[in-house]
Image (cartoon, coloured by chain):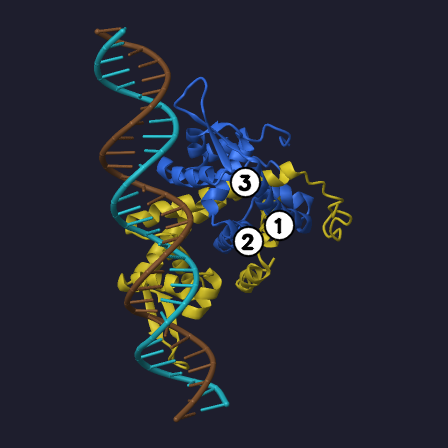
Chain colours: A blue, B yellow, C brown, D cyan
Amino acid sequence: MADGKAGGTKGGQALLFLTDEQLRKGIEAMFFAYRGFTADPDRILEKYGYGRAHHRAIHFISRAPGTNVNNLLGILGVTKQSLNRVLRALIEDGLVESRVGVQDKRERHLYLSDSGRALEAELSEAQRARMRVAYREAGHEAVAGFRRVLEAMMDPDQAAYFNAMATKEDKG
Amino acid sequence: MADGKAGGTKGGQALLFLTDEQLRKGIEAMFFAYRGFTADPDRILEKYGYGRAHHRAIHFISRAPGTNVNNLLGILGVTKQSLNRVLRALIEDGLVESRVGVQDKRERHLYLSDSGRALEAELSEAQRARMRVAYREAGHEAVAGFRRVLEAMMDPDQAAYFNAMATKEDKG
DNA sequence: ACTTTAAGTCAGTGTTGTTGACATTCCAAG
DNA sequence: CTTGGAATGTCAACAACACTGACTTAAAGT
C-alpha cells in the first residue's frame, strides 16, 4: 500500500489520508494561484514591452549581481540562445550591464543599471504586495506549511539552487 | 507604513513580521515549485506531441464533463482562437468528443473519449504522485497552510471558479 | 425580421522556446 | 610556442502557442 510509514512523524501528522480528490484540488490550487502570482508583474511588463522571461532574468541578476550567463542558465532552465535574446534586449535598453570577466575573459558578468534596478523594484514590489496579503490572510503557520510543501515539490537540483540562495538572512 | 493592522487575527497569528527577504523567498519558491509541478506532465505530453495547453483542456474537461466551450474559456483564461487550436487537435485525434447541445444547439458539449480518459489518467497520476510525496514530506498541517496561502494568492474570480469546483467531497 | 449569442475560422503578430553554426577565449599536451 | 579541444557566449532560422481583429455560420431571443 506504500503508505506504511507516513513520513518520520515530524510535525504532528498521524497518517495523512490523501484522496485523489484532495490531491487534485491541490493541483488546481497551484494552477490558479500561479496565474494570480504572475498577473501583476505581467501587467507592468506589458508597459515596457517585456515578457516573463525578462522578469526572470532581471530578478535573478538582481539577486546575484555579477553572475555570469552560464550560472543564470542553470537557474532559469532554458537554453543559452533563448536567454541571450532576452539579455540582449535588456542590455540594449540599458537595464543590464554586461562586463567582460577579469580572470576569464570568456565570461560576461551581469549587473543591473539604475534603470534596471528601478524596474526590478517595481516588479518585485507588486509581487511582494500580493504575497504579503496572502501571507497575512493565511496566517503564520500557513506560511511555514506553504514553504515546506513548495520545497518538497521542487526537483532536487532546483531545490539545491533554491537553498543555495537562502544563505543570507532567511535560513529559518 | 501600511502595516498598522495585521489582519483580523483570524487564526492564531499574532502580528506577522514579514521582511522583504522572506517574501522574496516565497516568490522564488513559487517559481521553482511550479517548474517541478509541471515537469512530469510535460515529459508525458512530449511523447504525444502535445503541450501544456492540451493538458489544461483535458484536465478541466475531465473535471467537468459536458462543459461547453465558453465555460472552458472562462476557466482557462485564454482566447477562443487559442483554445480552438488545441481543441481541434484533441478532437481530430479522438481524445475529446464534441456533441451538439440538446437544449441549445449552438453549444458544443465536451467529453473525454476512452483514449482521452487514458491520457488524462496518465498525466493526472504523474502529477498526483509528486503532490502526494510533497504532502507526505511536509506533513498534515503544512498541507492545510499550503492550500490556504494559494487560495489567498488567487484573483477573486479565479478563486470563485476554484471554490465552485470544490463542492463535491472536498469542502473541508 | 432583427439582434444577440455560441462557436469556429482566417490572417497577422509577438514572445519564448528550440537546434545549428560560429567566434572568442582559455588551457593543457605536444 | 603552437595547436587542438573545451568552455563561454553570439547570431540566424524555425516551431509552438499565445494574442488581436475581422469574419462566417447557426441558433436563440425578442
What residue do we see at 64% from left, 48% from top?
A129
- Residue position for label 1: A130
Residue type at the position of mark 2: Gly
Say which element carries label 3. helix
Q: Position of residue A161 (x, y in %)?
A: 49, 32
Q: What's under tag 3, amino acid-wise? A: Ala
Query: What chain does mark 1 sit on?
Result: A
The residue where tag 2 is placed is A36
Callout 2: SS? helix
The image quadrant that residue C26 belongs to is top left
Q: Nearer the viewer, mark 3 or mark 2?
A: 2
Chain letter for the residue marked with disc 3 in the picture: B
Mark 1 residue type: Arg
Give x and y (percent) for residue B140.
59, 45
The answer to whether marks 2 and 1 mark residues whose Cβ atoms lie closer than 8 Å is yes
Q: Quadrant of the C terminus of chain B?
A: bottom right
